[in-house]
Image (cartoon, grey):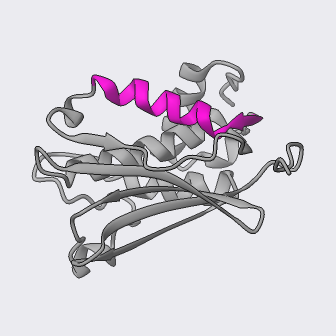
Amino acid sequence: MRERKLKGTLPGEYLFCQRCLSVNALAEYEANWQDIPVSELRKELTTFFATHPLANDKRITYPREDSSVVIETDMCLILRVLTNMVLNALEATAPGDEIKIWGERRNGAYSFCVWNKGQIPPDVARRVFQRNFTTKNQPGRGLGAYSMKLLGEKVLGGQITFTTSEEQGTTFRITLPVSQNHPAPV
């Protein structure tokens, strides 16, 4: 029996999305495409992490933002991807340190970037997007980075990448097309 799609309700979409990850039923998910200002996504992230336990004693900064950018995406899914990026950065960040979240606009696309100063060890970096791979010493599902890649690329049509080095730290990036319905101001 096919489960009913709960369009228009973020909690319902989030739960359905989680089910898709758990049982490989991603083909069942229908994205709820909307034009969303980048500034609205930043506001959602700021609110969510203002009281999140992993953010205690850590700074989350937004060094630059182009508030005029609008992307066509599924609000639930892009927030899921961005939240996983931020959670991973916070887990790798020591108390007193910071993570940075910013955006970059290039060639009709917009990239959300999340940086922390730590380097991912090479043996972990090779497996970071592998399903059920976790670096935690406690039980975990190992779906965070895997779901970022799966949802960001297969459903949202973007590209998920990361760079890591001792000198530059680690930056995760999701790149999506800018909405054609909202051209850049001249």
Residue at the far front in the pictured view: 186
Q: Position of residue 157 (x, y in %)?
A: 70, 58
Residue 44: give x, y in percent of width and height. 50, 28
Q: Residue furthest right?
A: 181
50 vs 17: above or below: above
Report the residue at 71% width, 45% height from top.
Answer: 69
Of the 4 image quadrants, the one containing the N terminus is top right
**139 displayed left or right of 62:** left
Magenta-drawn stretch, dominant element (helix, strand or loop): helix
- x then y, percent, for residue 150: 55, 57
Q: Residue at x 54, y 50 (%)?
A: 24
**How many numbered marks have been drawn onto this rendered protein structure?**
0
Apparent side of residue 73 relative to residue 61 in the rendered image (left or right): right
Question: Is residue 178 or residue 9 the one in the foreground?
Answer: 178
The residue segment tinted magenta is: 33-51
| Above or below 43: residue 130 | below
Q: Nearer the viewer, residue 156 or 64?
A: 64
